[in-house]
Amino acid sequence: MSGASPYAGMTVAVGTMHGKDAAFAPAFARWLDAGVRPSADLDTDALGTFTRDVPRAISPEDAAITKARAASSELGTPLGLATEASYAPAFGGFGPVVHEELAVFVDVNRGIHVTHGVRTFADVAPARTVTDEGEAGQYLERIGFPHQAVVARSEGALRKGIQDAAVVRDLVRRGPVVLEPDLRAHLNPERRRTLRRLSWMLAARLRTPCSVCGCPGFGLVDAERGVPCAACGEPTAQVCAEVHGCAACGEREVHARAVSVADPATCRWCNP
């Protein structure tokens, strides 16, 4: 780490209702010499919830930009930050799921936003209908309750953030209950670990200036695909190069990966 941080002594407003500022504080202090503060009045759930009671109407990146700008405005600082997570089945729906966490940093003074994401596998238990206390207990043990909170649906009602087994037992006594993990950051230890990892990646990127204009945040913006299949030579979806860029001037650098051929198992021609 060389040179002064472009954000030294400044405050980054974090658009969150779920304690995400705690995940970013150490990295931003270490890399950027900047502090973080959570928003107080911003209703981030209005842009969509994991429990689907509020559907997401815009893309994850647009939602994060909206939250980051709103937090910046609320706290009166030119710097805003927000994240959005998506979960999708992997391996045809069996085993772990793919967790993609996207962070957006907004610098109002420079007129830029920097997007950085991380994709990993996560152990997210599928929703399960339980009809007695024994089944409920097994499910709670499976997800790591109470550190991992649970969501309960019963008789048309939705209960979020449950960390008391007595609440679940009481619901089950009244009838069948659908249980699922609460994926919000403050109630999901695995997601908090991913957020901390992402925070260091984003903070390091914000210390990386563009070689042309000097704007902070130079880094990965795209990928080029098309590594040829080792068997038939046709291009595959495997990444052959990373494209790094600047959020201000549009400078681009292509960094080729050290790979010359792709496994035929990834080829849509050899393995349709």
Image (tube, rainbow, N blue to C red):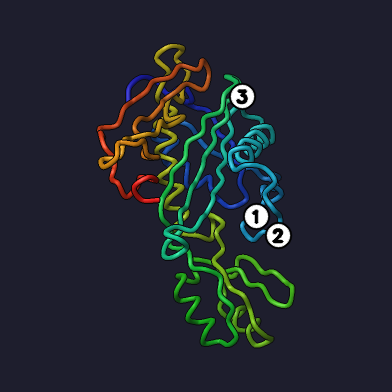
Q: Quadrant of the N terminus?
A: top left
Disc 1 marks which amino acid? Thr
Position of 249 with respect to 122 (left or right) is: right
Please name which of the two marks, 1 or 3, marks the residue nearer to the observer.
1
Residue annotated with mark 3: 108
| Few, some or many residues within 10 Å of mark 1 (<14, 14–19, 20+) | some
| 3D distance between C-alphas at marks 1 and 3 | 27 Å
Residue annotated with mark 2: 53
Residue annotated with mark 1: 49
* Residue 161 percent across, percent down from the top left: 60, 65
At x 53% / y 28%, what residue is drawn?
A: 10
* Residue 47 percent across, percent down from the top left: 69, 47
For marks 2 and 3 on the same chain, the one whose residue lies earlier in the sequence: 2
Using the image as rendered, state which of residue 150 and residue 120 is in the foreground.
120
| 3D distance between C-alphas at marks 2 and 1 | 7 Å
Using the image as rendered, state which of residue 234 and residue 236 is in the foreground.
234
Q: In this view, does 267 lie above or below 146?
A: above
